[in-house]
Amino acid sequence: MNDLTPAERAAFFVLLKRQPLFKWEREVLTELVLASLEKKGLIIRGGQEWRVTEHGRRRAESARKP
């Protein structure tokens, strides 16, 4: 996940856990960051919510492995 900016990484991992509940979680989900993650194929818009794609989940899993 080295190709992600710190803001993109924070937003991606918030969405990877669950839908954002806390104010700080919602604040990292700026439209600019979400659009960038969508362009990279890591998330998609599902109605009013954003969801992590299968490609995004695989990238997150591979990033966790040593």
Image (spheres, rainbow, N blue to C red):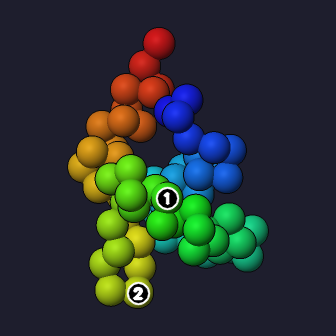
| Residue 55 on image: x %, y % | 27, 45
Q: Is residue 17 visible?
A: no
How far, Cα to Cα, is label 1 from label 2?
A: 17 Å
Toward which corner of the image does residue 4 lie, by quadrant? top right
Residue 53 lies left or right of residue 49; in this view the side is left
**Secondary structure category for the residue under label 2:** loop
Q: Which mark is nearer the camera, 1 or 2?
A: 1
Specify which label sits upstream in the sequence, 1 or 2: 1
The label shown at residue 48 is 2
Which amino acid type is marked by label 1?
Answer: Ser
Which residue is identified by label 1? Answer: 36
Q: Residues within 10 Å of mark 1 (few under 14, many from 20)?
A: some
**Secondary structure category for the residue under label 1:** helix
Q: Is residue 7 visible?
A: yes
Residue 19 lies left or right of residue 57; in this view the side is right
The residue positioned farthest toward the left in the image shown: 54
Residue at 71% across / 72% down in the picture? 27
Which amino acid type is marked by label 2?
Answer: Gln
The label shown at residue 3 is none
Residue at 59% across / 46% down in the picture? 9
Toward which corner of the image does residue 59 lie, by quadrant? top left
Above or below, 47 against 15 in this view is below
| Residue 64 on image: x %, y % | 47, 26
Above or below, 66 against 60 in this view is above
Above or below, 55 against 65 in this view is below
